[in-house]
Image: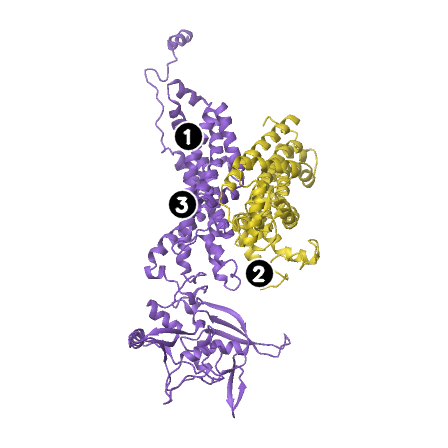
Chain colours: A yellow, B purple
Amino acid sequence: MVKYILKRLGLMIFTFFVIITISFFLIRLLPQEMPQEANLQALIRARWEALGYNKPIIVQYGIYLKNIFTKFDFGTSWKISITKPAIEVMGERILPTVIVNLYSLLFSIPVGIGLGIYAAIKKNKWQDHVISTLVILFVSVPSYVYAFLVQYFIYFKWRLVPTNVMYSLADAGGSYFSFKMFQSLILPVLALSFGEIAGLTRFTRAELTETLTSDYMLLARTKGLTKAQATTRHALKNAMVPILPSIIASFIGILGGSMIIEQIFSIPGIGNLYIMSINQLDYDIFMLESIFYTFIGLLAGIVIDISYGFLDPRIKMGQR
Amino acid sequence: MSKDVIKTNVVDDRFTFAHEGVELHDHKLATKSRGYFADAFYRFTKNKASVTASIIIIIIILFAVIVPIATPRNVQTLMDPYYSKKGPRDTTFYRLGVDGALSNVYTDRTIIYELSKGVGAEFSEEKPVVTVAESMDSYYQPVVKMKAYDTSVGGSRENRFDADVDQYLAVGFKYIAIEQHKFDVIRAFEEEHNIKIMYPLIANNEYTYGQDSADAANFWYKTKGKADPIKIIDGVPVIQKYNENLVLEENYMRDSHGNFVYRIYTGGGDSSTAQYRVRVLYYNYYRYLYGREPNYLFGTDSQGYSMIYRLATGIRLSLIVAVLVSSINFVIGALYGAVEGYYGGATDLIMERISDILARVPFVVTITLFQLHFAAKIGSFASLMFAYVATGWIGTAGAVRAQFYRFKNQEYVMAARTLGASNRRIMWKHIFPNTLGTLITSSVLVIPSVIFSESMLSYLGIVKLGGAKTTSLGTLLSDASSIWMSYPSLMIFPAIIISLLMICFNLFGNGLRDAFNPTLRGSDQ
């Protein structure tokens, strides 16, 4: 077990470094643009000289790695917020992303799993057909279409919420956890949730129908358990084995967030920053974002694999 | 030999061999045999949802092919700034509600403003102003239907009206600058087609509203303050409320003889270069300019192109990207996966590491890097394609590799090898056909994911595919992104098409998977 985890971690770090290296060279090779203002230009030039941006690219890479390991310094924002450390610029933006996605997950997990269980129990009855048809529709439709729909109906037509974009921190009373902020988050959370719910429903239904028809369920019924008992104690538990890791992975995934939803609802999050960094060509921020997304992806992958082993004793680590 | 052995053991001579002296062969199959693909096709046609989905896909593809062919060349490039962002309108289906109208709430002032355009269009020298009720029958009346509603509920003392207003006719009148020659041509056109394009200019006095605004040409009636319509009663201006028999007081420009003035000289030399300012009814001016009425079945896009044409070209572009990516991935994935799976061992380990690392690069980062590095050199479209291809084949390769692992140690492969078949022959002739089902399914499922990510990337502005000639579905959405609440049709049509494409391709792909691999039916991975 420990050996397997260590091996996976080692591979992950290796992959991580290769990707970072490639990204670093590709990004640093891009031509840098200077701001128009003369004073600012001089300041940035001086800083670049001091930070070694004019040295050969291999040396730059060495400096970059050294700074990360010794000072946890991922470079500086040159365009978005000038001369602020990149890690701080991004740090401010993690909370909005996490909040929106967390609310969405907290909403969609119970609904999705509940609908999935219901559909599986009512398999091939009309309830199942309705749910399955809706699931096909909702899984396929892109999330930004939901964003338009909820904006149009809930905000524009029915006026159920006060705004169609996220409030800024100042507008919402200085806290991301105020009620006012929550109100402005309802739309993005809904837009994110439709697809999430549909996916979970489909997954749960597929897994549960499989376990419901297995032999041990027959055994459970034969030894006298009611259908409800057998379902909750045996079928559901087994059906959860593949579902739980994917849920855990989505909890890691909430750090990454959804770029398009952040863009539509102007959420000042990670994805929004990514788009800004591309539009304004703020390469250090772009580099940090790339590192961040890569890391999240790798972490989610490894957590899924390891959690399988913990959840299901039948799966032997390293022998899959 | 064996016959003899048996015979010696059989004592009784009364037994005879049933098939003695007959050579036994397999029977020829009585029924027609069915190949793998024919079988898959048969199963596919049994799946109603997939068949429906494929029909819809075919319809969409036909739409994307036929519309650009059926659209006249001058309409393809026709971009009228005044008729941009408009809803669907078609004179043939006008009464059915395809009238380019938007519903809105109006006050006395604003409803009279809209109605006045219809009244103004009915101008004639003999009877300059008709009543509002009379103007409702006018071909140029932008207000399609209206009704006053009870305002006592809201507590406001002003009248409110619910009205559908044709957004094309609502453009109303415009001032344009033309030369003497063009003036004559328009006059001739007016007489030939019996329509009125040029209307009298508006006097410049205390009742004129918004001399410099874009809507100035619409205020042919006397106004006061914020363009409230007035009547002069005993020398005192009185603000008018809406009623059916309202006759607005005209404010047209007249010369010293009391005739209406249609043009004023604004500069230029001789008779051919002299510039004039005239006031035109834009709807009819459009007819003069392009020789057609503004019929836009899907409305116009944010720039003023015909939405139905832009949509068709957008679908075409998105589908071309998707199909190209899918087929390139098919080839690369098949080659890579086959080599990995067939040779195994160290080859597999190294190749698997490479593809693993590539697969772990976040897709949006890949695409951004390709755009930043290559978009200026080889164009957005090509760099988008390269980015898709750079990492897109990995999933396909993985599927092929798994299939190769499954089949490469089976007996028939060993038999082929014993008979001296080369590696290449075993790979492509014997094992590869077994992977085709999976491969085709995964390639088809690549199409919706490419369409989706293309639209998303265009929307986010990471990829910029739009241009005068081409556009993509995502670009249409992104153009509409900030203004769609006021102009819903800009968003509705592309969004419906993308959703339909996504749903249908997913259903189609699932149907294919079930058909090629019946054991997977119902599972969703």
Residues packed near mark 1 inside 10 Å, few (<14), some (14 to 19) or many (20 plus) = many
The chain holding disc 3 is B
Which residue position holds label 2? A153
Residue B63's place in the image compared with A239, above or below, is below
Question: Three-letter amino acid code at disc 1?
Answer: Phe
Q: Earlier in the sequence, mark 3 or mark 1?
A: 3
Quadrant for the C terminus of chain A in the image: top right
Residue B472, numbered label = none
Where residue B310 appears, as percent x and y from the top left, is: 41, 57
| CB within 8 Å, label 3 to label 2 | no
Q: Position of residue A107 (x, y in %)?
A: 65, 49
* 3 vs 2, front mark: 3
Q: Nearer the viewer, residue B334 or B232?
A: B232
Q: CA distance from mark 3 to mark 1?
A: 35 Å
Chain of the residue where label 2 is placed in the rendered structure: A
Report the residue marked by disc 3.
B378
- Can you tell which of label 3 and label 1 is closer to the viewer? 3
Q: Give a yes or no on whether discs 3 and 1 share a subunit.
A: yes
The residue to which callout 1 is attached is B432
Q: Are marks 3 and 2 on the same chain?
A: no
Identify which amino acid the numbered label 3 is placed on: Ile
What x and y, as percent, mark residue B153? 63, 75
Secondary structure of the residue carrying numbered label 2:
helix
Is residue A78 visible in the rendered image? The answer is no
Q: Quadrant of the N terminus of chain A?
A: top right
> Is residue B379 visible from the viewing direction of this image?
yes
The residue type indicated by label 2 comes to Phe
Q: Residues within 10 Å of mark 2 (few under 14, many from 20)?
A: few
Q: Is residue A178 left or right of residue B372?
A: right
Determine the CA span between mark 1 and mark 2: 51 Å
What is the crowding at mark 3: few (fewer than 14 residues within 10 Å), some, or many (at least 20)? Answer: few
Q: Secondary structure at mark 3?
A: helix
